[in-house]
Amino acid sequence: MRLRRTMQFIPGNNPGMVQNGGVLGADSIILDVEDAITLREKDAARLLVASALHSINFYKSEKVVRINSIDTFAREDINMIVPCGPEAILIPKTHCAADVHQVVEWIKAVERPGQKPVKLIPQIESPQGLIEAYAIAVADPRVEALALGAEDYTATLSAQRTKEGTEILTMRMIVVNAAAAAGIQSIDTPFTDVNDEDGLIRDTLLAKQLGFKGKLSINPRHVDIIHQVFSPTAKEVEWALRIISGLKQAAKEGSGVITVDGKMVDKPIVDRAERVVQLARTLGLLKEAEK
Amino acid sequence: MKNSVNREIPERVDNYGEVTPFNGAFTLIPTMNRQAPRVKSCLPGDIKLVDSLEEVFRRIPVKDGMTLSFHHHLRNGDYVLNMVMDTAAKLGLRNLKVAASSIHLVHAPLVAHMKSGVVTEIDTSYLGGEAAKAVSAGILDKPVILRSHGGRPRAIECGQLKIDVAFIAASAADDCGNLNGVSGPSACGSLGYAMADAEYADWVVAVTDNLVEYPLAPISIPQTRVDYVVRVDCIGDPKGIVSSTTNITRDPIGLRIAQTAAKVIEAAGLIKPGFSFQTGVGGASLAVAHYLGKMLEAKGVTAGFALGGITGTMVDLLNKGLVKRIIDVQGFDLDAVRSLASNPDHVEISGSFYASPFNAGCAVNRLDTVVLGATEIDVHFNVNVVTGSDGVIMGGSGGHSDAAAGAKVTVIVANLLRGRLPTVVDNVLTVTTPGETIDVLVTERGIAVNPLRQDLKKAMSDAGLPLVDIRELKEEAESIAGIPRQIVTKDRIVALVEYRDGSIIDVVRQTEI
């Protein structure tokens, strides 16, 4: 599964920003035709996004489009955008598995022969969606991640939205758990104060601590900070390499018990170390000898 | 004839004379003496205070054909140039030369004076606003001379820019003509660009809205060369004095470029104790100072000095102990003004000290790195900051070509695309700064290193920075935006772009209207 530490929203009706989408360094860019676009601009944004998918080089960033919700313009969006080859579609306001099934049906109807199947990232933004999170996560093999949208969710609850995020802790944990149970990624809600760098770091560290694999971003200035948090630290990489090397040593010696730094290492720890090394390798953080 | 950056330069220009073609950044070595300024005297009891500009004009007296000079430390808030030229017009003077270190939007009334024949010549380091448009359209018979910030004091000292009367706006003055720019309601900071004028002009007139008791302290320009002091109601608008082009960009692309530029400087191995740097005006270059500061902090390194146009970002670094000294030829915001007034490690210098190539060593020569902007840059790394995409004058070198020549590593930061126009082109319309003095171009779509700097190229590659050929950047820009139509100009020369040593690096021709 590809790396999605950052998924950066770009308003789909802004040619300057769309054109530069690929230079922001985000793992994924989300060309948005939903929330960022007023009703009068929907068709213009749809056209621009479709054309950008054809003509703009987004470099290494994954090309994702956030369509409108299925009860509004999702079908029109899919009809025009899917044949242009987005790598994934972010489905906003996903309430249940049936929503995913509906989107898949519409996508299949317009995918070109031979086109790489478009992946799906349902966004959970409602109490109902949260209850159905696991069902949504396993609704279709195209689903690669669950994303979280805290603003709509807390508004529905009439909960007060805070920077600390106590009010969305349950939501975060349920989404992380549902995604993990389905073997897919979980992507955290964006941090909305564009100028509070410390707040962003705290919020992202919390997301990483809870098990999220990445974070939505609404400001390109947040991309590097989120990357730093989601990238393994030198200390983490060193620890993981020691575990792997201990594992190899044990195998060589035919020993069933692995100890590193005098502590016994069991399977979950090995799994974690392997994930860290894999991520470090993807990010080019390993020295030649360590690969 | 062609000069060494392949520009067609006339051997002689009417109303200018013989042209020395640019032949490389460090090829002209002077063998001459400086111009000796007029010897002055002042008897005990002589009074320098004069009631009005008109009275000063009568006493000197200012005559047709004279050269009047101005500094631009009040930038787009300056009232003094307009006040003086209105006085000249009112008194019926004609054929005057305006030698201003910079001409801004606020100086639009110059257009009427050029039309009416009050002003027939301009000599400046930066020409913007309506006056620039009028010059490009051919309003003057004589070509404007565009000099760099270092080239201007060089020309004054060498007698090539002879100033009859220097009008020096001062935010504080005493009645003997001691001046500074750090006190008073119109404080603008350093008076660096007025210092050569004060020293060499036949007549020096201080214009102030803040007359203080003798003796003024601190003193930037001493009484010894000042002939008259005129008190006016107001010398400038503080809002315009603090330039809006000196805010750090919030544009994510600009910030990305700035961050990459800081990484380039780090990769060049320059971030070590004693490190020295300058950043130009313009959001992205200013943001580099911010990122360099973070780097210094993270590495626990103290820089030796920051130079140039000074902003609050640099003052912060000084106050945090991340930079030992600031060398200030020009301040851009109130933080810079306050710091210059109060911090002994914040040093005011003249334009000649800053950047003149013809003295015993200018400050830019001590720069490790400078980060500058560009309107256009070509595949030979020549930079244009004089003319815009329509061929019309919209700026000038300022300190661009000076700092580029002096610094060990000159970095240009520029968006590869501006609106729908590529920034990297085959040939810039007007060469301001020669490619031989530009080392690295940083855009949002890649870093290009001048092939003359294989050492830097290796350092960047070793640091894992993604390098591209500048031609590839040009092609990428063109693949997105297309190839712009070539600008058509008339034959007539409206401005000469002088390199810092006095040779002519390019000319600006009249634009089609």
Image: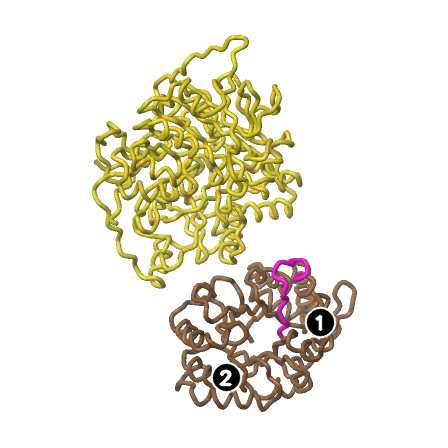
Chain colours: A brown, B yellow
Q: Quadrant of residue B203?
A: top left
- What residue is at 64 percent from the left and 67 percent from the top? A276
Q: Is residue A251 left or right of residue B93?
A: right
Q: Chain of mark 2?
A: A
Marker disc for residue A210: 1
Let me know if residue A204 appears in the view.
Answer: yes
Name the amino acid, label 2.
Ala
- Residue A74 is labelled as 2
| Mark before the other along the chain sequence, 1 or 2 | 2
Q: x%, y% of residue B505?
A: 31, 36
On the image, the x and y values in percent for residue B352 come to 45, 27
**Are circles 1 and 2 on residues that touch, CB within 8 Å?**
no
Measured along the vertical axis of the image, is residue B256 above or below residue B373?
below
Pinpoint residue B257: horizontal percent, then vertical percent. Answer: 49, 53
What secondary structure is found at the residue carrying circle 1?
helix
Badge nearest the viewer, 1 or 2: 2
Where, quadrant-wise, is the N terminus of chain B in this rendering? top left
The type of residue carrying mark 1 is Leu
Residue B339 against residue A98 in the figure, above or below: above
Q: Secondary structure at mark 2?
A: helix
Which residue is more in the foreground, A256 or B362?
A: B362
Mark 1 burial class by Cα count in 10 Å: few <14, some 14-19, many 20+? some
Percent position of residue B367, x then y: 50, 35
Span highlighted in magenta in the image:
A184-201
Q: Which mark is residue B174?
A: none
Give the quadrant of residue A244.
Answer: bottom right
